Amino acid sequence: MKSFLSLATALLFAAPALAQQPVQAIIRTFKDPNTKQVIVVAHRADWRHEPENSIPAIESAIKMGVDMVEIDLKKSKDGVLLLMHDETLDRTTTGHGKPADYTWAELQKLTLKNEHGGPTRLRIPTFEQCMLAAKGKVMVNIDKGYDYYQDAYDVLVKTGTVDHALIKSYETYATAKAANGKLLGGQLLYMPIIGLGKPGANASIREYEEQLKPVAYELNFATDTALTHSIYQTIPKTGSKLWFNGLWASQNAGHDDERSVEENQPADGWGWLLAHGATIIQTDRPAELLAYLRARKLHK
């Protein structure tokens, strides 16, 4: 059986016929509850080939043909929204400490590190730069950005990319509505994250189904039984999509990217997620997942 790594390599260097769809086509697919096309989300963009949460990583993921890139937000001391996952600068930049302790000008003196921890010449990007790079090309999932909901929305308005973005949180509907009621359910798409093994998970799903009907739900589950004992099967009936993660085993009961690629068992990895209703998959292996889905006519 041909390995998915080989398929992915071929995909990355394919002819322009596999070029990325215009973002409006992606948005229509994302909002269509009846399509059989599966949305592919590149976690921290293409971090295997470029520094995570960087503009080149976003651009590489776009060329690959993903539908959405996931990015993380932090804020500088003087209020600039920037792309960064960790609470500190240490792992991904040449700096130390919290980004909130530095002005934007000070942060721009630092450079990003590559996946092996080596320094590059790349600078930390702003959220505005991110959205301008994505504009017209790809959707953007804003993770770790809920605390900056209004600030993020303002950037999206400024860049004309409100419809490109999806913001998410672990909050219950009541909490999210109380904090961001004017924006919740508006043009900026919102997605609740539900830990299916946690008490109250089913109640939270019901509340969102009744009050908001979000475009999608991100579902995390450490065991198969946590998924099968939930009421998640009711979600598609309300027109919402199911977002599953192919990232770490703790988020998908071991039906993960590594099982699909490194262990060459995609039927028990991504295939299992699809069989259990996934219509969106976030992955650290976007090229391989695209090849897998395209071979099954589940991605254009």
Image (cartoon, rainbow, N blue to C red):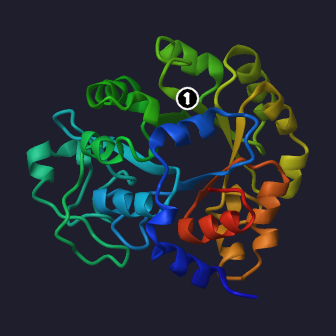
Which three-letter amino acid code belongs to the residue tagged 1? Tyr
Quadrant of the snapshot with the N terminus: bottom right
| Circle 1 residue | 190
Task: Tell me where residue 137 appears, x and y as whole percent.
Answer: 40, 47
Task: Tell me where residue 183 appears, x and y as whole percent.
Answer: 47, 17
Quarter residue 229 falls in: top right
The kind of secondary structure element at disc 1 is strand
Q: Is residue 212 left or right of residue 164?
A: right
Q: Considering depth in this image, is 250 or 108 the residue closer to the camera? A: 108
Q: Is residue 297 left or right of residue 39?
A: right
Q: Can see residue 170? A: no
Quadrant of the snapshot with the C terminus: bottom right
Q: Considering depth in this image, is 13 or 96 the residue closer to the camera? A: 13
Q: Residue at x 89, y 52 (%)?
A: 225
Q: Is 120 above or below relative to 168?
A: below
Q: Residue at x 27, y 50 (%)?
A: 98
